[in-house]
Amino acid sequence: MFESLHTPYPISEEQRYSFQKNGYIRLKNVLEPDVLSYYGDAITKFVLEKNPLQDVPLEERNTYQKAFIQVINLWREDETAREFVFSKRLAQIVGDLMGCSGVRLYHDQALYKEPSGGFTPWHADQYYWPLESPNTCTAWIPFQATPLEMGPLAFAVASHALTEGRDMGISDDSERLIAEMMATFPYDVAPFDLGEVSFHYGWTYHRAGPNNSNQPRKVMTMIYFENGCRVTPFKRYEHENDHANFLPGTKVGEAAASELNPILYERT
Ligand SMILES: O=C(O)CCC(=O)C(=O)O
């Protein structure tokens, strides 16, 4: 059952090259509809139970809160979510795209954009992470086909090479200032088919439009980093916070390898 979750998904040289050059890639038919439906239902139930914003109407939320309902590290609390997050296929794809012999989990997070939910401002994920290596990757996995009106993830092509703007978290300011910086980069926005998954480096700039449909945009994400990556000195509060939550007990300068960072892929 659900073979596609764990069997290898071959990555060609061309796909690896494209990922490393552009900073992201969308891959079709990564997961079968039955896998998405089974795990999507379980994860949605969990997200609705844990939704930290359930009593806050959309119009009273800030830009970040309007963008999505965010529930983190489901794998630690829900066995079905754990099976999904520990997908061998997704971790193998990440290892092959980054060209690494092993990858660890940083954390998972569900990002559900409600009907009428707002845009996700421009940002690069690694702003938040005290991780030294640029070989980090987020897998963005929609549980439904995601047309443009639902706010699919969109990327600035090859923006992971740019070091400017790396001191900005998700905010109205990042939407404005990073948009200005991205003016010279091609903007790639496209609908996602059912089963399609995108992968982007931690330093790739990306955003998402609002959800103008009347259906929730249900998305699960997993963040990975290359095995051997070290913890960097903290540059900001977010690094300290992430360290406490996702790398407990690890020391600056040493391997990021806490009990919360299992190896999910190792090339044999
Ligand atoms: O789903 C979204 O709207 C944003 C997702 C995102 O920024 C990410 O997964 O890195």
Image (spheres, grey):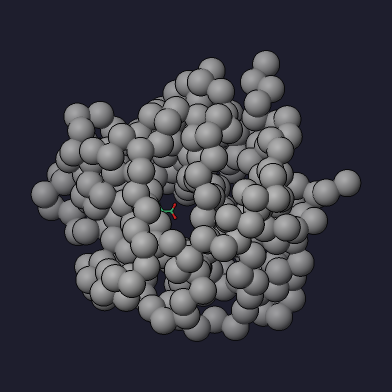
Q: Quadrant of the N terminus?
A: top right
**Residue at horizontal 37%, vertical 68%?**
185
**Residue at horizontal 69%, vertical 43%?**
11
The answer to whether one can see residue 245 in this image is no
Q: Whole-percent x and y of residue 22?
A: 51, 61
Question: Image quarter for residue 92?
Answer: top right
Judge left or right: residue 49 versus residue 36.
left
Q: In the figure, 225 relative to 168: above or below?
A: above
Task: Pick the residue in front: 151 or 238.
Answer: 151
Q: In the figure, 63 relative to 192: above or below?
A: below
Q: Whole-percent x and y of residue 74?
A: 52, 41
Q: In the figure, 1 relative to 252: above or below?
A: above
Q: Whole-percent x and y of residue 136?
A: 60, 62
| Number of callouts | 0
Q: In the figure, 67 relative to 50: above or below?
A: below
The answer to whether one can see residue 37 in this image is yes
Q: Whole-percent x and y of residue 106?
A: 60, 56
**Residue at horizontal 75%, vertical 47%?**
265
Question: Image quarter for residue 234?
Answer: bottom right
Judge left or right: residue 12 versus residue 243.
right
Judge left or right: residue 13 versus residue 223.
right
**Residue at horizontal 88%, vertical 46%?**
268
Question: Image quarter for residue 102?
Answer: bottom right
